[in-house]
Image: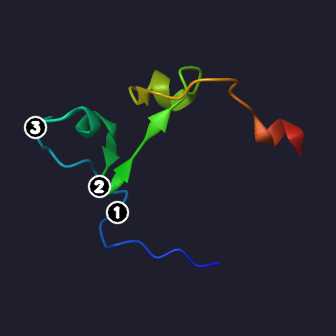
């Protein structure tokens, strides 16, 4: 599998004003992130918009 991303993706989040509800989801350049409230990302300020059981797939291996 190959995943190609535009140059600059996952670099620092651009300093843009929040104008809509989905603007808060911008986590890095070209990267939008929705997190579960129990996740490390939510603890770091990501939008906690996912519901349901937070599965740990590492524990399932």
Name the residue tied to disc 1: 9
Position of 51 with respect to 22 (left or right) is right
Q: x, y percentage for residue 56? A: 75, 34
For mark 3, give the secondary structure: loop
Q: Residue at 42% of width from left, 42% of height from top?
A: 33
Q: Residue at 24% of width from left, 32% of height from top?
A: 21
Name the residue tied to disc 3: 17
Q: x, y percentage for residue 17? A: 10, 37
> Along the polypeptide, which appears first: circle 3 or circle 2?
3
Q: Residue at 57% of width from left, 24% of height from top?
A: 51
For mark 2, give the secondary structure: loop
State the CA–CA distance, disc 1 to disc 2: 5 Å
In which image quadrant can residue 23 be found? top left
Q: x, y percentage for residue 10? A: 37, 57
Assess disc 3: are there few (<14), some (14-19) or many (≥20) residues with their C-alpha within 10 Å of its C-alpha. few
For mark 1, give the secondary structure: loop
Image quadrant holding the N terminus, namely bottom right
Q: Nearer the viewer, residue 22 or 28?
A: 22
Q: Considering only vertical position in the picture, is 17 above or below 36? A: below
Name the residue tied to disc 2: 29
């Amino acid at each position: 599998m190959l995943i190609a991303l535009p140059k600059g993706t996952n670099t620092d989040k651009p300093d843009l004003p929040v104008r809509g509800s989905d603007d808060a989801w911008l986590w890095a350049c070209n990267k939008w992130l929705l997190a579960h409230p129990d996740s490390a990302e939510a603890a770091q300020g990501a939008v906690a918009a996912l519901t349901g059981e937070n599965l740990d797939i590492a524990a399932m291996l």
